[in-house]
Structure formats: C-alpha cells, structure tokens
Amino acid sequence: MNIKEIIIVEGKDDTVAVKRAVGADTLETNGSAISKETLERIAHAQEKRGVIVFTDPDYPGRRIRAIIEEHVPGVKHAFLAKEKTLAKNGKGLGIEHAKDEDIRAALAAVYTPRQAEQAVEITMEDLIDAALVAHPQAKLRRTRLGAMLQIGYTNGKQLQKRLHMFGITKKQFIEAVQALNQEEL
C-alpha cells in the first residue's frame, strides 16, 4: 500500500507504526497544542498531495482532528476503534499500539494510491553546495528556506526528505536558494 496523501499523526511512535504498516509520508503534530507553523505545513501538504488525519481515539486525538478540520478544510480522516489501539499491558492507547493490518484497514477506506515514485531530484551534494548542510550558517539558511518553501524547519538530515515529500522540484529549489542568497547581500 503506497499512499499519495501525507498522513497526520500525533508523534514519532505513530510515525513508526504507520511506516511499518504502509508506504507513506507523515507529519507529526507533537501533541494537541498544534502550532500555527504546523497548521500552515498541514495546509501546504493538503494543497500539494492531500492529507489524511489519523490520530488516537481519545480526547486529545479528537481535539487535534477538530483543530485541523477548522483550519484546513477538505482533509480526509482515518479512524481506529479504541479496542484496536490498546497497549498490550492495557496501560495507554494509541495508533502506535495498533496492529499493522488494522492500520492498513483504517487507511484503505480513504487513501489514494501513489503513482510511480518520483526520483529524488535534489541530492545531498546540492544541499552542501547551497550551504544548507555542513556550513556555519546552515541552520539559519535552512530556517529561511523552510519558510520560503512552506515546508517548515528541518535539520540537515531531514531536509532532503522534506523537499521530496512536498514535491519541491530542482527548479523551485534553485530559485529559492537564489532568493536566499540575494537576501544575504
């Protein structure tokens, strides 16, 4: 199951569970206090590829769904019943505790199959040449680039993956880096 939409989950453990079950990209809300920046990133993801909200079946999960639905119209929702998300020890619940087949079944109802995977256009060498990694100003430049391209801040290791996730072309990347260089003059 290769999923076109970007799946919105609550945290890293949910990302691990989803990626174990299906081929998909995820964005994490990091809890129910969703920042303005995270909402903007979700809206951008909705424009680019579509979004599936897949949160825990508890109060914080429902709150996250409501906040995203209010700010980003048209998102899809995948649900798992509470009993399918219980931890083995009975303490806690969440997507991270769900079986792979249950995750696949929940997403099967709403996902769009991803067409052939596009090749990664932007290489690590491109990031180094653009002074976005392995450079004294790299963190500052990644922060500005993330804002320009509406993909948010990432560390050097994650930048290439995030550019690919949002479908940033080599041309868009080069134009953004040129604008970044102009700002610094």
Image (cartoon, helix red, strand yellow):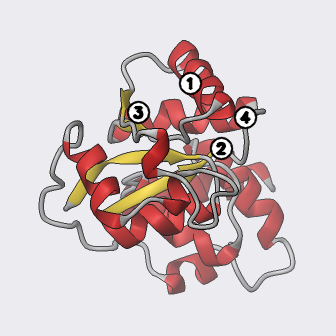
**Type of amino acid at the residue the image marks with label 1:** Ile
Q: Give the mark, 2 or 3, whose residue is nearer the N terminus.
A: 2
Q: Tell me residue 48's x, y (percent).
A: 36, 39
Between 44 and 177, the residue placed more toward the observer is 44
Q: Give the mark, 2 or 1, whose residue is nearer the N terminus.
A: 2
Whether residue 29 is situated above or below residue 16 in the rendered picture: above
Q: Tell me residue 67's x, y (percent).
A: 62, 20
Q: Tell me residue 174's x, y (percent).
A: 48, 61
Q: Which residue is mark 3?
A: 46
| Secondary element at image label 1 | helix
1 or 3: mark nearer the eye = 1
| Secondary element at image label 3 | helix
Please rate how many residues cluster around mark 2, counting C-alpha atoms within 10 Å: few if below 14, some from 14 to 19, many from 20: many
- Note whether residue 175 is visible: no
- Note whether residue 40 is visible: yes
Please rate how many residues cluster around mark 1, counting C-alpha atoms within 10 Å: few if below 14, some from 14 to 19, many from 20: many
Q: Are marks 2 and 4 in contact (CB under 8 Å)?
A: yes
Q: Which residue is mark 4?
A: 32
Tell me the quarter of the image containing the C terminus: bottom right
- Picture quarter containing residue 50? top left
Seen at 51% across and 71% down, the residue is: 160
Q: Give the mark, 1 or 3, whose residue is nearer the N terminus.
A: 3
Task: Tell me, for residue 29, which label it has, or none.
Answer: 2
Q: Tell me residue 163's x, y (percent).
A: 48, 60
**Type of amino acid at the residue the image marks with label 4:** Ser
Whether residue 126 is situated above or below residue 26 in the rendered picture: below
| Secondary element at image label 2 | loop
- Picture quarter containing residue 131? bottom right
Task: Tell me, for residue 68, which label it has, or none.
Answer: 1
Q: Give the mark, 3 or 4, whose residue is nearer the N terminus.
A: 4
**Type of amino acid at the residue the image marks with label 2:** Thr
